[in-house]
Image (cartoon, rainbow, N blue to C red):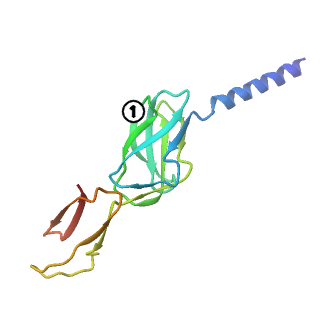
């Protein structure tokens, strides 16, 4: 009888531990394979149960080796966050959502997704030497933008900045 009681107690404790550690946050978007563009607004979405509704949201550019904070200790009740995608380029991006009050309750994208720069300057490419008062064609290929641009330059640094309008 004592052995049966010990066995039953062990099973109950084991089940309690399993259910207590069950994942209660699941990232649903982005979840792998998406293509986002820098400066784009993107809706991060997740499902949750048994959480505090205070969240930390992070992204990784290297498949989860390092994480950068997007938001911390945000009270969110609709399980979504409007993220301004950083102006970087990477094909190994992940999103992670954590319960601020119980960081063990967390999930990240199931697969990597990509972020591309919205503009690729094709000319000049950085190797040119131009004479003052000369004319040169500036070309670029836009992606994920409105197609309307402000063109700015600096005569002192010899840089060209194309920004989506």
Residue drawn where x is 12% and y is 80% of the image: 134
Between 148 and 62, the residue placed more toward the observer is 148
Number of numbered discs overlaid on the protein picture: 1
Between 146 and 117, the residue placed more toward the observer is 146
Residue with the most extreme right position? 1
Left or right position of 79 against 18: left
> For the residue labelled by badge 1, is the local secondary structure a helix, a strand or a loop?
strand
Residue drawn where x is 40% and y is 38% of the image: 81
Residue drawn where x is 90% and y is 17% of the image: 1
User: Where in the figure is residue 46, as x and y percent of width and height?
Assistant: 50, 38
Between 11 and 146, the residue placed more toward the observer is 146
User: Where in the figure is residue 161, as x and y percent of width and height?
Assistant: 22, 64
Left or right position of 153 against 40: left
Please determine whether, in this image, residue 17 is positioned above or below residue 37: above
Residue with the most extreme top position? 1
Left or right position of 131 against 61: left
User: Where in the figure is residue 22, as x and y percent of width and height?
Assistant: 63, 33
Residue with the most extreme front position? 147
Residue placed under numbered mark 1 in the picture: 74
Residue drawn where x is 20% and y is 82% of the image: 129
Query: What is the crowding at mark 1: few (fewer than 14 residues within 10 Å), some, or many (at least 20)?
Result: some
**In the picture, which quadrant includes the C terminus?**
bottom left
**Quarter assignment of residue 127:** bottom left
**Quarter assignment of residue 150:** bottom left
User: Where in the figure is residue 66, as x and y percent of width and height?
Assistant: 47, 52
């Amino acid at each position: 009888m004592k052995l049966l009681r010990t066995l039953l107690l062990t099973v109950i404790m084991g089940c309690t531990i399993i259910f207590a550690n069950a994942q209660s946050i699941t990232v649903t978007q982005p979840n792998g394979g998406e293509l986002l563009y820098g400066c784009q607004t993107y809706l991060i979405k997740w499902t949750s149960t048994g959480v505090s509704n205070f969240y930390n949201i992070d992204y990784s550019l290297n498949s989860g080796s390092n994480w950068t904070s997007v938001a911390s200790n945000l009270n969110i009740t609709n399980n979504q966050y409007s993220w301004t995608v950083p102006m970087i380029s990477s094909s190994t991006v992940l999103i992670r959502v954590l319960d601020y009050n119980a960081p063990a309750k967390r999930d990240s994208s199931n697969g990597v997704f990509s972020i591309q720069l919205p503009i690729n300057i094709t000319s000049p490419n950085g190797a040119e030497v131009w004479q003052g008062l000369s004319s040169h064609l500036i070309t670029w290929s836009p992606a994920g933008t409105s197609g309307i641009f402000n063109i700015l330059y600096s005569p002192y640094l010899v840089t060209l900045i194309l920004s989506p309008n």
